[in-house]
Image: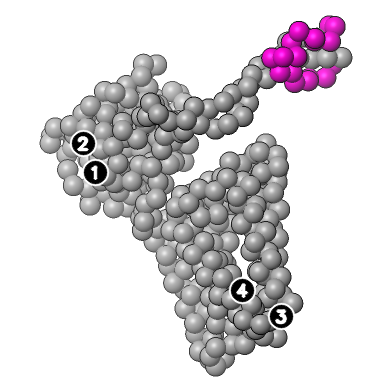
Amino acid sequence: MKTIITQFSRLFVGILFIISGLIKLNDPLGFSYKLDEYFSEPVFNMPFFVPYSLAIALFLVILEVVLGVMLLIGYKSKWTIWSLLLLVILFTFLTFYSAYFDVVKDCGCFGDALHLTPWQSFSKDLILLFFILILFFNQKLIKPLFSNKIQNILVLTSIILCSFMGYWVINHLPLKDFRPYKVGTNIRKSMEIPDSAPKSVVEMIFIYKVNGVDKEFTEKDLMNLPEGAEFVDRKDKIIVQGYVPPIHDFKLELNGEEQTDMILSKEKALLIVAYDLEKANVLGLQKINELHKKATAKGYYVGLLTGSSAEVIAKIKTQNNFDFDCLFCDATALKTIERANPSFVILNYGTVTQKVHYNDIEDLKL
């Protein structure tokens, strides 16, 4: 019985690590954005790690896949199981911290393919920890499946293939798009909230300064505020989360006026997505003017979407001689639309028909 349980744990942990790692390796930039949340001030306040988020993301996801492979084939079982144990303890701590302090809404364990709440992620990690502990206390039952030479070849091959996949998707696009803006999506329809959809239950929280200290009060408490309490702020606390449409933050502004409907009503629209113009690839920006002329000649509306400030937009337009609309959109939404900076999206009456990386601009079907 002990052998059966141990081998089941081996298969369960190994396969889950490979699947989880490959899903994130399909979109390492997305996972790096999630790491940025952990490194930010509201969470661990370690901004010095932010420039290395992508490198850390790639290392972790490749490690996940390779450790899964190593466990399945029984390669260096003691080292492998110790590594898995330390890794899952780290993940368990992060998911518990996120859940308890409500600071990161989705751990990104399975990328955009499967969204888990912080408490669901923590529960998943506890289950993983349970099975890894079974492996830890029964290490002698984990035997290699092949000779040392074949084992070494398999592990080295997994490292090379994972590294190549990471390189490819960063310099092109994810092999599989799990995001709300994938090709075939109608943005307008994805923003709609059905009449029958459950509504959120929200409680208003009032913050008052009492004896120099900020304290929170509910609406019921307002009739019994301490003497001398000074109003500071008000915030909404979600008690029950209602229906949230797949796309809920797509809002385009031009010179302070909303132009979302105008863009989504175009038969032919080419959108250049650059969430941060100052961080945009210089060679990618240099390709835009020629593309603009080609698209305009074929009847396309061309607009650049960015989360950069008006000052940065003006500077980049001058430097690159851009002669088309530059619309403001929330940077987080733009990161969700596409990972490359810049990237190119074609819309037909609000439906996404094509998306390409700046390295693949010649593949655009205008």
Q: Which mark is residue 348?
A: 2
Q: Are marks 3 and 1 in contact (CB under 8 Å)?
A: no
Quarter occupied by the C terminus: top left
From the image, state whether disc 4 or disc 1 is nearer to you: 4
Image coordinates for residue 219, horizontal then vertical, percent: 69, 14
Label 3, label 1: how far apart the Cα atoms are: 52 Å
Q: Is residue 274 visible?
A: no
What residue is disc 3 on? 138
Closer to the camera in the image, 147 or 195:
195
**First reached walking from the N terminus: tag 2 or tag 3:** 3
Label 2, label 4: how far apart the Cα atoms are: 49 Å
> Could you tell me the amino acid type at mark 3?
Asn
Is residue 326 one of those drawn in magenta? no
| Region of the chain picked out in magenta, as a range | 212-228
**First reached walking from the N terminus: tag 2 or tag 4:** 4
What residue is disc 4 on? 9
What residue is disc 1 on? 353
Q: Callout 4: helix, strand or loop?
A: helix
Closer to the camera in the image, 132 or 348:
132
